[in-house]
Amino acid sequence: MIRIALVGDIGSGKSYFSKLFGYPVFNADSVVAQIYKKNKTCYNQIKKIFPNNFSTFPLKKEELIKCILSNQNNLKKITRIVHPLVSKQMKFFIKKNKNKKFVILDIPLFLENNLNLKNDLIIFIQSTKSKINKSLIKRKNYNKRLIHAFKKIQWSLPMKKKKSDFIIKNTFEHRKALRDVQDLMKKII
């Protein structure tokens, strides 16, 4: 099995591209959302560190955002609790899909959390700032300050690009995106 990890800027289209490959996708953002909704142990650990920030289980998105924006270090503390749980889910996903030819890893902090293995294929999704901003503004819960907080804990784009094996330029055009993925898969296979 070959692990393909997608990296890039917030809003560059990693989740969109991950679905175009046609192979099982591990979406870390979805996993984190489920952890916040269903994992009481995680809630208790976060509540212990931030006793005044959270009211009741499950974790509420508004309370999380308020906590993260009140102090940049809070995001790092929350990430230290949540990351091992995401990593455990990723291992389960990989084990479950071990007979597949490829799995797609859509994990925002893939490189930052040293999740990459020697034989992983890393694809950098590149787009212009203007197109990314247009895409982000359309998101339901768009919060510029929150995005800025997340960018602060991520590697720089040039560093991610340097670590990548391939680059896909996202123009936010569906046909081109499909063609780019098909062309890339021909190179990989």
Image (cartoon, rainbow, N blue to C red):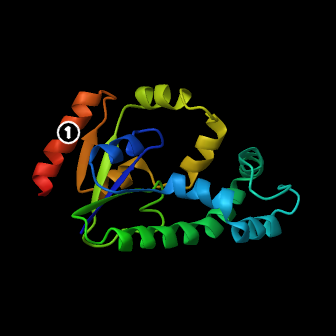
Image quadrant for the N terminus? Answer: bottom left
* Image quadrant assignment for residue 77: bottom right
Residue 157: image location, x then y, percent: 40, 48
Residue 98: image location, x then y, percent: 30, 72
Callout 1 amino acid:
Asp
Q: Residue at x 41, y 67 (%)?
A: 93
99 over 155 or under it: above or below: below
- Residue 114 shown left or right of residue 103 in the figure: right
Residue 73: image location, x then y, percent: 70, 59
* Image quadrant assignment for residue 115: bottom left
Q: Residue at x 41, y 39 (%)?
A: 12
Image quadrant for the C terminus? Answer: bottom left
Q: Secondary structure at mark 1?
A: helix
- Residue 77 shown left or right of residue 84 in the figure: right
Q: Residue at x 41, y 62 (%)?
A: 111
User: Label 1 neighbourhood size at 10 Å, few (<14), some (14-19), many (20+)?
Assistant: some
Residue 114 appears in view: no
- Residue 75 shown left or right of residue 31 in the figure: right
Residue 57 appears in view: yes
Q: Which residue is mark 1?
A: 180
Q: Residue at x 65, y 69 (%)?
A: 81
